[in-house]
């Protein structure tokens, strides 16, 4: 199953709201607020690579208050 970790920068003060919105997306398996360069880390999984890319592009990146993202696709052995 294709999976990715998405590092998210959100508008200041909106981190909690963005995490709640992320958890409402069915393919987002986990979402956490973190300290550091990024504000939020989300784990996203899908049945296919095309579906994974679609979810990240159209559901995660388009959430209100998301400023930028960095996506790390997991390599399976």
Image (tube, grey):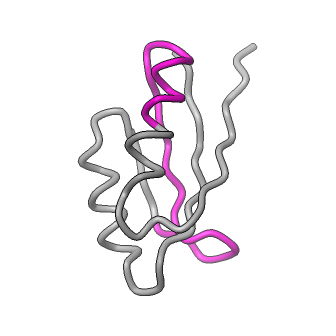
**Residue 2, quarter of picture:** top right
Who's the residue at 38% across and 43% down the image? Answer: 59
- Relative to residue 10, is residue 37 drawn left or right? right
Can you name the residue that lies furthest to the bottom here? 13
Please report the residue visible at 49 percent of the width from the left and 50 percent of the height from the top.
42
Where does the image place residue 54, in percent across and percent down from the top left? 46, 29
Estimate the x, y position of residue 22 in percent, counting from the top left: 34, 52
Residue drawn at x 28%, y 57% as measured from the top left: 21
Q: Which of 63 and 13 is in front in this view?
A: 63
Vertical side of 44 occupied by 6: above or below: below
Classify residue 44 as left or right of residue 18.
right
Residue farthest to the left?
24
Left or right of 11? Residue 8 is right
Seen in the picture, residue 51 relative to 71 is either above or below; the reply is: above
Total numbered badges shown on the rendered structure: 0
Q: Which of 63 and 37 is in front in this view?
A: 63
Which residues are drawn in magenta? 33-55
Q: In this view, does 40 lie above or below 50?
A: below
Quadrant containing the C terminus in the rendered view: top right
Q: Where is residue 56 in the image (x, y as percent from the top left)?
A: 49, 39
Q: Position of residue 32 (x, y in %)?
A: 45, 61
Q: Does the magenta stretch include residue 50?
A: yes
């Amino acid at each position: 199953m294709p999976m990715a970790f998405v590092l998210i920068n959100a508008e200041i003060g909106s981190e909690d709201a963005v995490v709640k919105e992320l958890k409402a997306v069915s393919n987002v398996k986990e979402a956490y607020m973190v300290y550091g360069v990024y504000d939020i880390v989300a784990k996203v999984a899908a049945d296919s690579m095309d579906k994974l890319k679609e979810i990240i592009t159209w559901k995660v990146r388009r959430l209100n208050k998301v400023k930028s993202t960095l996506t790390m696709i997991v390599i399976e052995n």
